[in-house]
Image: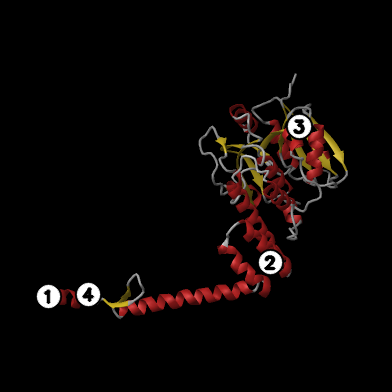
Amino acid sequence: MNSAQVTVLIPLYNKAGEVERAVRGVLAQSEPNFSLVVIDDGSTDGSADVVARIDDPRIRTVGQTNLGASAARNRGLDEARTELVAFLDADDEWRPDFLTTVLALRTRHPEAGLWATGYERVFDHGLRAELPALIRVPQSPEGGLIDDFFVSMEKDCPVCSSNILGSRGVFRETGGFPDKVELGEDWDTWIRIALKYPIAFSPGVQVRYHQDSSDRAMNRRRHSGEDTAMARTLRRALADGAIGPAPRASVASLFSQHLLFLARLRIMAGDGVRARKLIAEARSHCNCKAHWRRMWVESYLGPGVNTVLDAFRRFERSFRRRRRTRNSNAGYARNPRGQKSEVRGQELIRRLDQGP
């Protein structure tokens, strides 16, 4: 008899072409002690029927009206019968040792709030894969704690909605997944957990994260650039000082980068006033000169100014190259103070040989 120690949760919405691959990957795990709950979030393409045709006593399907990915994940937390839960999107897949890896990581680092593995992004219907640009994550095969999770998020996030093991208690304590947000609800969840707990990571790639799937949320919707759950969480944490073990500077830097991302979207939408407010807030938390100055100009002149600025910079670089070449051919250089000095090589040597 199966004595599950982990409940695998798959939120499902219109993934009839991919969900069987996800479920088969779970059933092929080298760790057999799990149960699988598929939360059908009002699919209209027969996705639930695909799951129903897979005969395995560990699978259970629950249905609800279409309420979104966060509501489906929260429903899964309610339906789980174990403390440990692992999430998998219906269009992604696990390699056979995923559960074994995260359970071993949890044994070594029980203090963590999440346990995650490496993943690869898959494109072109599985024909092309690439690794994300992860920084400041453990590199040893056995894994470890991420020393600064907020710095690691400044590139590609080391955790995603298909590569983590967590506990229901931690999800409940930190508020679960936020309902009715545009996109990025999972990032907001990871941040709220990381503000209270360290995050453990094993670098071995155990997850295939498909970015070419049909009806993927990121393909259906785009951020409007309005305030996000992630921005609200980071703003509140910095104001209250509730940042747990995280360095304040790292949290502030991530918050500033996110605000500039939102400002960019408002510029593209033609809302320069809102963009400038976001830029000003970003500057108040981090001195990000390399980014905000150009965006400030764009907020007045529109995104098309990029083309003009780039053309001007290309002309300026070309002009400087030509001037350096002309000066070099004329036998002139600049000393560190920028003053011109004659450096005719052979003539200078001859004069030195002659003495005063």
Residue 277, given in percent of the width and then of the height, sits at: 70, 64
Q: Are marks 2 and 1 in contact (CB under 8 Å)?
A: no
Q: Earlier in the sequence, mark 1 or mark 3?
A: 3
Of all residues shown, which one is farthest toward the front? 240
The residue under label 1 is 355
Is residue 18 in view from this perspective? yes
The residue under label 3 is 36
Q: Nearer the viewer, mark 1 or mark 3?
A: 1
The residue under label 2 is 276
The CA distance from mark 4 to mark 3 is 79 Å
Q: Secondary structure at mark 4?
A: helix
Residue 319, given in percent of the width and then of the height, sits at: 45, 78
Q: Residue at x 36, y 77 (%)?
A: 325
Q: Residue at x 30, y 81 (%)?
A: 330
Q: Earlier in the sequence, mark 4 or mark 3?
A: 3
Q: Are marks 1 and 4 in contact (CB under 8 Å)?
A: no
Q: Is residue 151 left or right of residue 37?
A: left
How many numbered discs sit on the rendered protein? 4
The CA distance from mark 1 to mark 3 is 91 Å
Badge 1 amino acid: Gly
The residue under label 4 is 345
Q: Earlier in the sequence, mark 2 or mark 1?
A: 2
